[in-house]
Image (cartoon, rainbow, N blue to C red):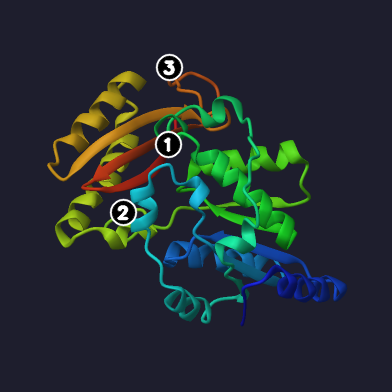
């Protein structure tokens, strides 16, 4: 497995793979890797010939500078984990490599970026679009792999690819959970032992909510989820919305067309956790 920090070193390696007729798979990450990330790498290894994983904590997508400073970083640990995976190349650039000059581009994703994460993290998705479009231009993958835990981000990236007519297939990969149900996240390692135990209440509530959709209206279920989570003294719900899978607009009735996703953000102390559940109605 190769570790590369500079674009000028990366691109000749990838061009050599393309000349051999090999397909390029790409898993962009911010490091602090866990089994959720590794599952993306495994899927990339199954679907493409040469797998690239980027490790870059992108400051332009953090609207909270405290969140940026707290974000865990351990490149050597990440490299050690990837050495046992199908990853063949790690791209770990410094800030100046990705942003040699300020990126002033403004993206417009309409309602996709105005609800949920977009409402509570202004500017976040513009930063995501900046860095993902740069990384796609640098790596030029055939396929890129993203987890469904960041459901709204996945929708934004798919729209980015459509808007910019980028020649990359976005592969959506399932949420990977801990044994107690908590969605795997790099932020989980920042939780205290007590917080970590109580954070599992988030997914437990979502699983229970999926069964309650038979008996409760959309509004009733939203209120039930928020109340149930906020009863836990360690947790405070920022939002819970049941939305259309494609538009991300809030659903009013179970009879509304399209698949319905329940998306949630919860503060556990200073750590912000997100998750989602599909409603089979």
Q: Earlier in the sequence, mark 2 or mark 3?
A: 2
Frontmost of labels 2 and 1 is: 1
Image x and y of residue 194, in percent: 14, 57
**Residue 182 badge:** 2
Q: Disc 2, disc 3: CB below 8 Å?
A: no
**Residue at the image position 59 percent from the left and 39 percent from the top:** 156
Up the image or down, 32 lies above or below 235; here it is below
Few, some or many residues within 10 Å of mark 3 (<14, 14–19, 20+): few
Q: How far apart are marks 2 and 3 (CA)?
A: 27 Å
Q: Which type of secondary structure does the marked residue at label 2 adopt?
A: loop
Which image quarter: residue 189? bottom left
Q: How far apart are marks 3 and 1 (CA)?
A: 24 Å
Q: Which type of secondary structure does the marked residue at label 1 adopt?
A: loop
Q: Mark 3 points at which residue?
A: 252
Viewer-nearest residue: 172 or 281: 172
Q: Disc 2, disc 1: CB below 8 Å?
A: no
For residue 268, side relative to residue 135 (left or right): left
The N terminus, quarter of image: bottom right
Q: Which of marks 2 and 1 is nearer the N terminus?
A: 1
Q: Name the residue under label 1.
A: 121
**Residue at the image position 53 percent from the left and 62 percent from the top:** 56
Q: Earlier in the sequence, mark 3 or mark 1?
A: 1
Q: Which type of secondary structure does the marked residue at label 3 adopt?
A: loop
**Residue at the image position 52 percent from the left and 76 percent from the top:** 82
């Amino acid at each position: 497995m190769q570790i590369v920090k500079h674009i000028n070193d990366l691109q000749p390696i990838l061009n050599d793979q393309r000349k051999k007729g090999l397909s390029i798979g790409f898993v962009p990450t911010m490091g602090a890797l866990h089994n959720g990330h590794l599952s993306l790498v495994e899927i990339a290894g199954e679907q493409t010939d040469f797998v690239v994983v980027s490790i870059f904590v992108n400051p332009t997508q953090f609207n909270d500078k405290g969140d940026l400073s707290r974000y865990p970083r351990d490149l050597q640990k990440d490299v050690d984990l990837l050495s046992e995976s199908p990853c063949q190349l790690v791209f770990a650039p410094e800030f100046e490599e990705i942003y040699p000059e300020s990126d002033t581009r403004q993206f417009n994703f309409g309602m996709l970026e105005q609800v949920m994460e977009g409402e509570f993290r202004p500017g976040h998705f513009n930063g995501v679009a900046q860095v993902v479009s740069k990384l796609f231009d640098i790596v030029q993958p055939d396929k890129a792999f993203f987890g469904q835990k960041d459901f709204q981000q996945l929708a934004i990236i798919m729209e980015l690819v459509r808007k910019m007519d980028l020649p990359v297939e976005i592969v959506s990969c399932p949420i990977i959970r801990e044994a107690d149900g908590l969605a795997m996240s790099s932020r989980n390692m920042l939780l205290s032992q007590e917080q970590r135990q109580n954070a599992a209440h988030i997914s437990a509530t979502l699983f229970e909510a999926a069964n309650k959709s038979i008996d409760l209206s959309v509004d009733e279920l939203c209120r039930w989820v928020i109340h149930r989570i906020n009863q836990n003294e360690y947790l405070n719900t920022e939002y819970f919305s049941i939305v259309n899978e494609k538009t991300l607009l809030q659903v009013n009735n179970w009879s509304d067309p399209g698949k319905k996703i329940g998306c949630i953000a919860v503060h556990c102390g200073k750590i912000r956790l997100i998750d989602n559940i599909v409603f089979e109605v």
